[in-house]
Structure formats: structure tokens, C-alpha cells
Amino acid sequence: MKKWSFSRRAVMKTILAGSVAPWVVYSRAFASSCDDHIVRLGGIASPDTMNPFATSSSFWPLIFTYDVWVGWDAQNHPDRTGFAKDWSVADDSVTWTFKIWPGMKWSDGQPATARDAAFTFNYLRGSIGTPNELNVGTNATDGFEVVDSIIAIDDETLQIVTKVPTRWPVDNWKMIVPEHIWKDISYADALGPFRNDPPLVGTGPMIVSEFHQGQFARLTPNPYFRTGQPATAGTIFSFFSTPDPIAQGLKSGNLDYGMSLTYAQWAELSKDPAIQVGQVRIAQRNYLAFNTASGDGAGSTRALQDPAFRDAIGYAIDQKAIVDRAFHGVADPGVGAIAPIAADYYSDLSDIRRHFDLAKARRRLDAAGYRDRNGDSVRKDKEGNSFQLELITGTGSGNVEIPIAAVQLVAGWLAEIGIPVSVTQLEPGTLGTRTAAPANGGGGWDLLITNSWPSAFPRSLLRFARSQQIGISNTSYWKNEKFDDLLSELDVTVDVAKEHDLVEQAVRLLYTEAPYIVLCYPFLHDARRKDCFEGWGTEDTLSVESYFPLDRLRPI
């Protein structure tokens, strides 16, 4: 944990060069040789369990072992289908019929059928309203409020009937788990005690066979994968807390692929003829969140609960400067909740968009009652207390790292308008504890700079402000009945024009209330070596939504 203090009289110089963390090399994981045909991946990630019902931090490596039901990739890439092979919806717009892959098997040789999918969905549904509701993991209960029934018609056919027309049956990306492994796991155990230790049983191309928290996961080829056993000898995914060892591993040949690189590392690697670099837009948003809680978990001042205070702060944030100075120009400046990758729903909010103006920020703070009352260059809240806010920051597990330069820029601008802050940098695990729901011991901080990387569906992108998600994806603790109603209506809307209208209303409401100020939408910088394997993607070297391309890599 690292701490800094910022005041108007002492604004620290922005540091653009990241610190180098020690890299502990585990010889078994990092043996550098093309001859063993093991694909070595590296990324910033901190998976804590292999249980998809207990955590959302283990997307990597679980995505290579468990097929998602449908999800983003299957709807945009026909060759990346998940557990469901194809689907249709009846004329009534509520009855969906899914066909799964015929003859599919789990990695232990047991048949994988529509009954496993029905079990996974109904296992989640059955927990709703219980003391141990499964609402915290990658596999969570969100969305099931629109479902009337889910039944397996036969081994290859699943029927989902919804209460109203909705795209949830195809837009959800629950990971399908085997009934014969999970049927005896209680909800209480699924929330955490059951770690689902390797070897796992899945239908994906690579099966987690070994997991060392904070170090690496070893995966072995699935001999029963539906399109044939992958041609490689396996995969090792190494977990890091900084990008420095990832870049080093690519240079040395100890890694075949690395993600979450800084721009400087990416640019340097692009000069190496043995390395192919990639750059792709993703659904991640880096944002400043205000602790809007009252009562338990509240911040140090009630000003955080005031939309006028939050709006004024928005004028002190220069998103373009953050992109130019902290991200070397390789990111999109932040605006609303919808990232540009969701192009059909993205809006630049030109008619209500705030523009960087420190003088305007000061005037708005004055007008809202937050003035410097004694000439000490520090503003006071409405109770007469001087502002001294705690800003916590950290990168979510598996997300693209937020440069500390971006945090320092924000803290510096706040100091310039009379709101000094102290900065505490946290590891993902500690960050999750601090931002948990107040009922679970979270909160007590004032400001938060972090990120979220949901699926690119608009419902998923907007979920981080839904009151039901407080302490899960809603890290501002914001509650707004109108916003919740808009998302509830969105959940049951299939008409494209109406869907766009609801998304626009929700985005505008969220922007004007300002529980979050989106700083930027970063690009994913990754790189791969050219010397050991072929079959990598061209648009995206390695998918951020599915198992691709571990099903089709081949040794050179």
C-alpha cells in the first residue's frame, strides 16, 4: 500500500514512468523453449479461487475451461460459439430454444448436455432470496428476474421462457458447470468455502489442472473438446501485479503472449522483429467514483452525497490531458458510461458534456455552498469542516492497469480548486475489501479511482450504477430509483429503437447525477512472440470474451 498527500500548495510532479516490481521466476512455469509446445501467457490478474460463483476476479483462467452460454463473442464471431451451438426465438418473443453441441463431453468424459445448462441456471435461480444468494461471482443471479422457466427438453435442447420479451437469454454469459460436480455443493459453500480446486471439469479447450494463487495456473488440453483436442501441449497463465515482468518475459522468450502492457513497453516491443504487437478497444472504463453512502460506510463529508458538488468536480477533470499525459494518447477520453466499443449505443453527450475549466469548477463549488471561508486555500463543507478527502485507487483483477500518473493528475486538479486529497494505492484484494457493500464492512473512504471491464452489452455497461449491485459492481453506493426503473425496463426490451432510447436516458441521468466521472476508455496493449505458435487472432490476438484462440493454436 502506498500513500501520497496533495494540497494546493504542494502538488506533486506527475510521474509517467512506472516502478519496476521484482519478478520472481518459477522455473517450472517459465522454462523458455518452443520444444515443449506449452503456450505461456502473462497478464495482470489476481484470481483467488477457481469457483465462478464466489468471485469475479478469476475470469482468467476460468474462461479457458468453462464455456459461457452464448455471450459477446458467439454473437460477433461464428467460429467462437460457447456451450450453446445455435438458438432461435418463437413468434411470441419470449420462448427461446437452444441447441447445444451434439455428443459434447466434459473433460472427465461424462456427457455434457442441456441438463447441465438447466442445472447451472436453476442453481443460480434457486438461491435468489435466500441468505446465501449467489450474487457476487462471474456466475451471479443478476438478470433472472425476467425468467419464467428454464428446462431441458432433451439432452441437446434447452428452452428458456421469459416473462416479457428480452435479449437476456443470449446476452448473458454465465459459465456452464457440470451438474455431477456441483449438485451437492450448498449455496453457503458455493459462496466461498468451496474453492473448486483443480483439476477442474469443463467443456472449454484448456482445463485448469494446477492453480497457485498469486503465481500461475497450469492448464492441460481437453481431450474431449468438441472440435478436437487442441494441438498444443497445454497452457501456463502467469499472474502479475505490474506489467514490467510481462514485458521482460516477452523479450526473453519466457512468455509467448502478454497483455496489459504500458504504452512505452508496447512501443519498445514493436521494434523487436520476433514480436507482433496488438492494440484493441475494450469495454473497460477508468473512473472516479464518489462515496455517496449515508450512514454506515459513508465518507468524511456529506458533500459527497450532493450532485452539485460532484458535478462541480467534473469541471476540474481534464480527460484529454489524462489520455495525452498518462496514456500517451492511446485511449479514448471519458464521457459517459457506455464505452466506444459499444458503438451502436455510445454517445458523446455533446449538449450536456462538461469541459475542463478550473475557474468554472470553483464558481460552481462557491454557488453550491462549498467556499474557502478563511483564506487558507482549502474549501469547507456545509458543516464548516475543511475538506481533506481520502482517495483510494487500484486496478481490478485482470483489468488494464491505471497509470499512477492519471491519479496524480486528478489529485493535483482537486488541490488547485481547494480540495486536498491523500492518495492510497491498494492491491486488488484490499481494494475489493474497501469497496465492499457497507453492510459487509466496506466504505469509509471518500473518492475512488479504479476501473471495471464488463461485457460490451449496454445492460452490462450500465450495471455499475444499479442499486442492486452496491458493493459488487456499484462501487459508488449510489441509489437512484429512476435509474433502476430505466434498467428494469431495458431488461425487458427487445425493440431496438426503444432500447437505444432507454440507454440514452440512463446514460444522461447517470452523467448529470455524477456518482461516477469517467476518466477514459483505455486500449488493451498486448504482444505475442512469433517463434513458437501460429493461429493467433488478427483483430484480437487473444479474446477478452472467450477461450479464443487456445482452441486453435498450433506449434510452428
Image (tube, grey):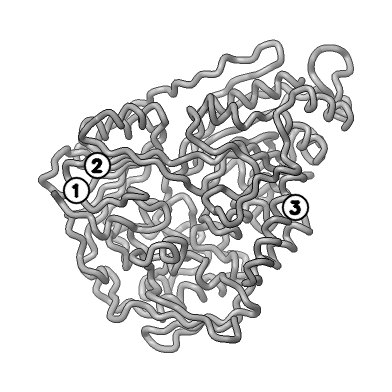
- Secondary structure, mark 1, is strand
Residue at the spot of label 1 = 533
Q: Position of residue 389 (x, y in %)?
A: 71, 27
Task: Count residues near mark 3 (Cα–Cα under 10 Å), then give few for <14, some for 14-19, many for 20+.
Answer: some
Q: Is residue 445 left or right of residue 273?
A: right
All told, the count of numbered labels is 3
Q: Residue at x 75, y 42 (%)?
A: 352
- Secondary structure, mark 2, is loop
Front tag of 1 and 3? 1
Nearer the observer, 57 or 326:
326
Residue at the spot of label 3 = 479
Q: Are marks 2 and 1 in contact (CB under 8 Å)?
A: yes
Front tag of 2 and 3? 2
First reached walking from the N terminus: tag 1 or tag 3: 3
Is residue 438 visible to us here? Answer: yes
In space, the residues marked 1 and 3 are separated at their CA atoms by 49 Å
In space, the residues marked 2 and 1 are separated at their CA atoms by 8 Å
